[in-house]
Image: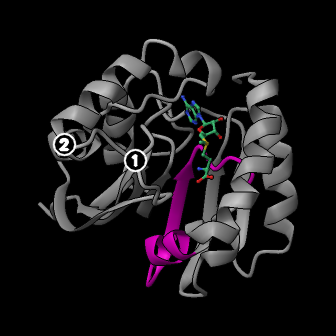
């Protein structure tokens, strides 16, 4: 269990506002055409749940923060697919190796204490030939914004539930053994001067079949 009561309250309100500003479209894109058994790590308040297509048989949603987990349990009740919400952390997933067709990481690889450990776990629980879907804010490829992100990260994790703005997440996904099949980069929200957490990606990484 990870307790971030203030962040949990703020995120619950802020994330619902971001849905109306376009995050819902990103979530729909993230989860399009998924099928079979899916594990979602750091599911938060369950905002992805209503976008799982009915080709998904079931979702195991892992969320360590109690307030957000309670909200996720409520969201799971109105989802079209079967979703079970459990306590747990990405760094030690409560699941057997190769037991899922796909894993979903949405705005969480910025917050795990160690990306390589979390991604190794995601790689372990996905079957050979299965996929990792990710929707994450990442280190900018613009040097000036990247410098701002690195500076901001001296304080950002302390006020944003452990979130970092300067993580090279796509490279980490590849280093974990996933082959990137699809990637889209964009700013969200789109502001005249980009905010540190604005550079985002939505992507698909495939665990090789052999
Ligand atoms: C910014 S929120 C994103 C929530 C949700 N995935 C979404 O798309 O809205 C980050 C989430 O990561 C969770 N988290 C933080 N550390 C984690 C860890 N070590 N393992 C799993 N989840 C973690 C937080 O509790 C929180 O729910």
Q: Secondary structure at mark 2?
A: loop
Q: Find residue 158 and report its horizontal and vertical position in percent.
A: 59, 15
Residue range in magenta is 25-45
Question: What's the mark number on residue 142?
Answer: 2
Closer to us: 133 or 17: 17
Residue at the location (33% across, 43% down)?
A: 138
| Residue 40 visible in the picture | yes
Q: Secondary structure at mark 1?
A: loop
Tell me the quarter of the picture where residue 151 sits: top left
Which residue, as the protein is rendered here, is positioned at the far front?
Answer: 192
Which residue is disc 1 drawn over?
A: 194
Whether the magenta-drawn stretch holds residue 198 is answered as no
Quadrant containing the C terminus in the rendered view: bottom left
Quadrant containing the N terminus in the rendered view: top right
Residue at the location (43% across, 12% down)?
A: 154
Q: Is residue 175 left or right of residue 125?
A: left
Tell me whether the residue at label 2 lies in contact with that at label 1, contact meaning CB atoms closer than 8 angstroms: yes
């Amino acid at each position: 269990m990870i307790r971030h009561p203030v962040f949990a309250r703020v995120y619950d309100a802020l994330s619902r506002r971001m849905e109306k500003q376009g995050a819902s479209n990103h979530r729909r894109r993230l989860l399009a055409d998924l099928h079979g058994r899916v594990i979602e790590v750091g599911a938060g308040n369950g905002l992805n749940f209503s976008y799982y297509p009915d080709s998904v048989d079931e979702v195991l949603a892992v969320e360590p923060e109690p307030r957000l987990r309670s909200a996720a349990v409520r969201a799971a009740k109105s989802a079209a697919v079967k979703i079970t919400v459990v306590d747990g952390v990405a760094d030690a997933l409560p699941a057997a190796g190769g037991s899922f067709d796909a894993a979903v990481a949405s705005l969480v690889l910025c917050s795990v204490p160690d990306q390589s450990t979390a991604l190794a776990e995601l790689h372990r629980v996905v079957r050979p030939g299965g996929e990792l879907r990710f929707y994450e804010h990442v280190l900018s490829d613009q040097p000036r914004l990247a410098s701002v992100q690195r500076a901001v990260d001296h304080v950002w994790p302390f006020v944003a539930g452990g979130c970092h703005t300067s993580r090279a997440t796509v490279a980490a996904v590849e280093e974990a053994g996933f082959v990137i099949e699809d990637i889209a980069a964009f700013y969200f929200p789109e502001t005249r001067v980009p905010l540190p957490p604005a550079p985002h990606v939505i992507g698909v990484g495939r665990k090789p079949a052999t």
